[in-house]
């Protein structure tokens, strides 16, 4: 008997492996036309597998002994028994896997043609083994042995009867072998492929199958539990997403409120009106929000917290109206003028400038009017103011144009504030062309905030210009102060 056919402690290496691969390959090396190198590698692979199998079988035997010890304990620790069973199955799996890997490694050493020849040889060898097993002499021998064992201590049956029975059974076995032999050969091939040759192997395979089925059921139960938990997690995830969205919206609202607190803006309230349709209201709100932001960037902070807007029907007689009503802190616009955003901007600029400096004389009313023209024009980057409103109301191209060369001597001191304000607005636009727009805007706005009530009553605007020049010293180290002075001197203002 070959060394690899037995393992320590009576453990037997898979006989199908020996017979159907290495034994066949090495014994039929001439028919397979194996090279010397292939033979050496196959023998080395066979030896390594035998050593590895011996080692793994030893581990398996130790684990079986430990399992028996656990089963004798009282009380029985099912947790440890379960763990040990899993360990034993793991050892068996490793053995089976090592067998499969070794077969594949061995086959890989053969050429494709050698592999085909090997397959034919394996079928021939296995069929011959099965035929030998079911041959007449083999059947007679098995029957005789069985009868001998069953009746060796009994004398109730005559020898002649036994022989007759043996003969009859022999005839039946021959017939049975004819009909059953072929399926059993095929079954033997299949079982041999999976390492099952003896009844003990088959019994173990059945036990393993039951364990696998139990484990499969356990895994299915766990899978169902995981699916339920997954559904719960998905539901919780959706809930958290919704809450996170709410949190983001709340965070944005808090950020907006914080910004509003740091840089308060005027809350716009529209007075109900028959001519204020939703489209017009939305357009006015959107335009005014942008203009408010423009003033906030200049450093404006609301002094009143809110401002009203009253859109009225056009008067039956006379011209449409547009003005800022100081006593009620509201902007009043006729319906036809409300469609011109620059008219709305000018009245809101009045609100900003007047709430910052509420008391002033005639000259500062002119300066304030010029600034109320300038800021909307600078915001729209166009020196022409009120083109839409002018065509509707006055049938002319515009209300005012700040790109002008007006002098203070061009209009009487008693002329309308808007006319003389156009002189100041023209000067401011020149400054904007001299400096960057955002620099000019901040310079003029910060200068207006320095105005006091005493100055409003006692000068002709000289103090405003002097304050402007003082503020201009911070722009590129006063680079433009001389030019700014010249702008006002050219328009006839004595400094």
Image (spheres, rainbow, N blue to C red):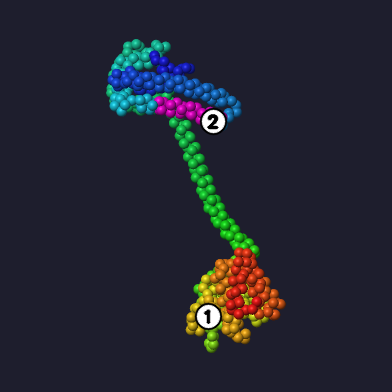
**Number of residues whose C-alpha sits closer than 10 Å to that of mark 2, classed few (under 14), some (14–19) or many (20 or more):** few
**Badge 1 element:** loop
Quick one: 228 or 144, which is closer to the camera?
228
Image coords of residue 469 (percent x, y): 64, 71
Image coords of residue 430 (percent x, y): 56, 73
Q: Is residue 204 above or below residue 495?
A: above
Pointer 1: what residue? 399
**Range of magenta residues:** 80-102
User: Is 309 part of what is drawn in magenta?
Assistant: no
Would you say the magenta stretch is mainly helix, strand or loop?
helix
Residue pushed farthest right? 454
* 112 on left or right of 97: left
**Number of residues whose C-alpha sits closer than 10 Å to that of mark 1, classed few (under 14), some (14–19) or many (20 or more):** some
Quick one: 417 or 300, which is closer to the camera?
417
Q: Quadrant of the C terminus?
A: bottom right
Q: Residue at x 30, y 25 (%)?
A: 114
Q: Quadrant of the N terminus?
A: top left
Quick one: 393 or 129, which is closer to the camera?
393
Q: Residue at x 66, y 73 (%)?
A: 466
Pointer 2: what residue? 83
Residue pushed farthest bottom? 317
The CA span between labels 2 and 1 is: 95 Å
Q: Is residue 56 above or below residue 451?
A: above
């Amino acid at each position: 008997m070959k060394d690899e056919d037995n393992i320590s402690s009576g453990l037997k290496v898979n006989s199908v492996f020996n017979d159907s691969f290495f034994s066949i390959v090495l014994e039929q090396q001439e028919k397979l036309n194996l090279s010397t190198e292939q033979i050496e590698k196959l023998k080395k692979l066979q030896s390594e597998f035998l050593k590895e199998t011996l080692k793994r079988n030893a581990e398996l035997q130790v684990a079986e002994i430990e399992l028996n010890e656990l089963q004798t304990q009282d009380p029985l620790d099912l947790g440890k028994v379960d763990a040990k069973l899993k360990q034993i199955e793991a050892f068996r799996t490793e053995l089976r896997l090592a067998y499969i890997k070794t077969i594949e490694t061995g086959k890989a050493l053969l050429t494709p043609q050698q592999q085909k020849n090997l397959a034919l040889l394996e079928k021939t060898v296995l069929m011959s083994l099965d035929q030998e097993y079911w041959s007449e002499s083999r059947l007679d021998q098995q029957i005789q042995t069985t009868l001998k064992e069953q009746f060796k201590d009994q004398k109730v049956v005559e020898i002649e009867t036994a022989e007759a029975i043996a003969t009859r059974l022999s005839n039946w076995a021959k017939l049975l072998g004819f009909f059953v032999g072929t399926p059993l050969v095929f079954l033997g091939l299949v079982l041999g492929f999976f390492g099952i040759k003896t009844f003990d192997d088959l019994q173990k395979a059945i036990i393993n199958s039951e364990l696998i089925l139990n484990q499969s059921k356990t895994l299915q139960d766990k899978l169902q539990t995981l699916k339920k938990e997954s559904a719960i997690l998905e539901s919780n995830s959706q809930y958290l997403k919704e809450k996170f969205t709410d949190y983001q919206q709340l965070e944005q609202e808090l950020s907006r409120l914080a910004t509003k607190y740091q840089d308060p803006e005027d809350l716009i309230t529209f007075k109900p009106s028959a001519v204020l349709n939703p489209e017009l209201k939305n357009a006015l709100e959107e335009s005014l929000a942008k203009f408010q932001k423009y003033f906030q960037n200049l450093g404006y902070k609301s002094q009143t917290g809110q401002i009203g807007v009253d859109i009225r029907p056009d008067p039956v007689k006379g011209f449409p109206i547009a003005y800022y009503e100081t006593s009620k802190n509201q902007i009043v616009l006729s319906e036809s003028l409300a469609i011109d955003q620059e008219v709305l901007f000018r009245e809101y600029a009045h609100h900003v400038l007047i709430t910052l400096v509420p008391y002033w004389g005639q000259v500062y009313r002119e300066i304030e009017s010029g600034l109320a023209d300038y800021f909307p024009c600078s915001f729209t980057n166009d020196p022409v103011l009120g083109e839409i409103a002018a065509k509707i109301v006055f049938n002319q191209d515009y209300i005012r144009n700040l790109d002008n060369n007006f002098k203070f001597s061009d209009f009487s001191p008693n002329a309308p504030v808007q006319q003389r304000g156009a002189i100041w607005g023209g000067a401011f636009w020149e400054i904007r062309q001299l400096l960057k727009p955002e620099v000019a805007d901040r310079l003029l706005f910060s200068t207006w905030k320095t105005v006091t009530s005493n100055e409003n009553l006692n000068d002709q605007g000289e103090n405003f210009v002097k304050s402007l020049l003082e503020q201009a010293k911070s722009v590129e180290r006063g680079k433009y102060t001389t030019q700014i002075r010249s702008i006002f001197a050219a328009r006839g203002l004595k400094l």
